[in-house]
Amino acid sequence: MKVNYAKIFEEEIRKISMLKIKPGLLLHACCAPCASYVLEELRKYFHITVYFFNPNIFPEQEHNRRFSELDTFLKKIDPERSISLIYEKYSPMEFAHCSSGLESEPEGGVRCFQCYDLRLSKTAEKARELKIEYFTTTLTISPHKNSTRINESGGELAGVYGVKYLFSDFKKNNGFKRSAELSREFDLYRQDYCGCEFSTKRSAPE
Ligand code: SF4
């Protein structure tokens, strides 16, 4: 039976909104457009630290551009800097290692599952290190990504690292539409491929 992750998210938010203090959340973000709506929504309920760890992005110039756009966006929406941002140094060998032998997999296949796992496991590990109560990712905003697989991975990693995972399906309830609106409003750089060198042939926006 298909799990409704958007409903699970709503139920968790309902519980959190009754708390007196906002819990901490380490939010893995891949780029500014994907983070835009997710931050608009989550900052009402969490004390957020954004985590940029994306060794999958190719080439390095594109990696740096996406980070820079995210940093600029955060400064615009959060001039008082209540949202922290952690930059993880570009480490393409980590992605090369996990995608080895999977180069010709179609987008959405096993290579992508490895890519989700790599980024989520590092986020969970970092959340544990920083003693942040929750972790999650912006990745479920994209209609090109497998939200079920992302959430399954997050749920498993929560058990491994002892950090709560915030299940989500951010594209639902007009989330993807809102991210497109915010991208236009803030004139955000919106890449036309997912990130790795094997995804550069697609020409639909993330
Ligand atoms: S297509 Fe995207 S999710 Fe899949 S492996 Fe490449 S960068 Fe990762």
Image (tube, rainbow, N blue to C red):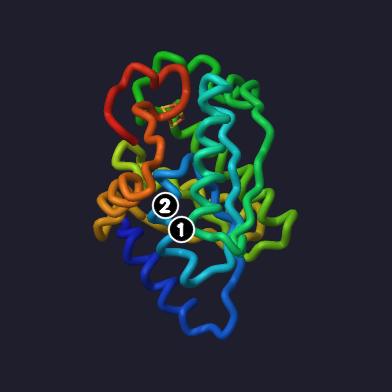
Residue 32 percent location from the top left of the image: 46, 44
Q: Which residue is rendered at x = 34% and y = 36% of the image?
A: 206
- In this rendering, position of residue 128 left or right of residue 61: right
User: Residue 48, can we see it?
Assistant: yes
Mark number, residue 36: 2
> At which x and y percent is residue 149?
41, 43
What residue appears at the point 35 percent right and 45 percent down from the top-left corner? Answer: 183
Question: Dot 2: few (<14), some (14–19), or many (≥20) neighbours within 10 Å?
Answer: many
In the rendered structure, the answer to whether residue 35 lies left or right of residue 90 reads left
The secondary element bearing badge 1 is classed as helix
- Residue farthest toward the right in the current orientation of the protein: 129
Type of the residue with mark 2: Ser
Depth check: 169 or 201 in front?
A: 201
Q: Nearer the viewer, residue 156 or 126?
A: 126
The label number, if any, that marks residue 15 in the structure image: none
Q: Quadrant of residue 178?
A: bottom left
Q: Residue at x 39, y 65 (%)?
A: 9
**Neighbourhood count class around disc 1 (C-alpha, 10 Å): few under 14, some 14–19, many 20 upward:** many
Cα–Cα gap, marks 2 and 1: 5 Å
Q: Identify the residue position indicated by label 1 in the image.
A: 39
Q: For mark 2, give the secondary structure.
A: helix
Quadrant of ligand 1 in image: top left
> Number of numbered discs present?
2
Tell me if the residue at label 1 has its CB under 8 Å from ligand 1.
no
Quadrant location, the N terminus: bottom left
Question: Quick check: marks 2 and 1 in contact, CB under 8 Å?
Answer: yes
Residue at image position (63%, 51%) is 85
Please indicate whether residue 146 sits to the left or right of residue 82 in the image: left
Image coordinates of residue 26 in percent, x first then y, are: 59, 56
Amino acid type of disc 1?
A: Leu
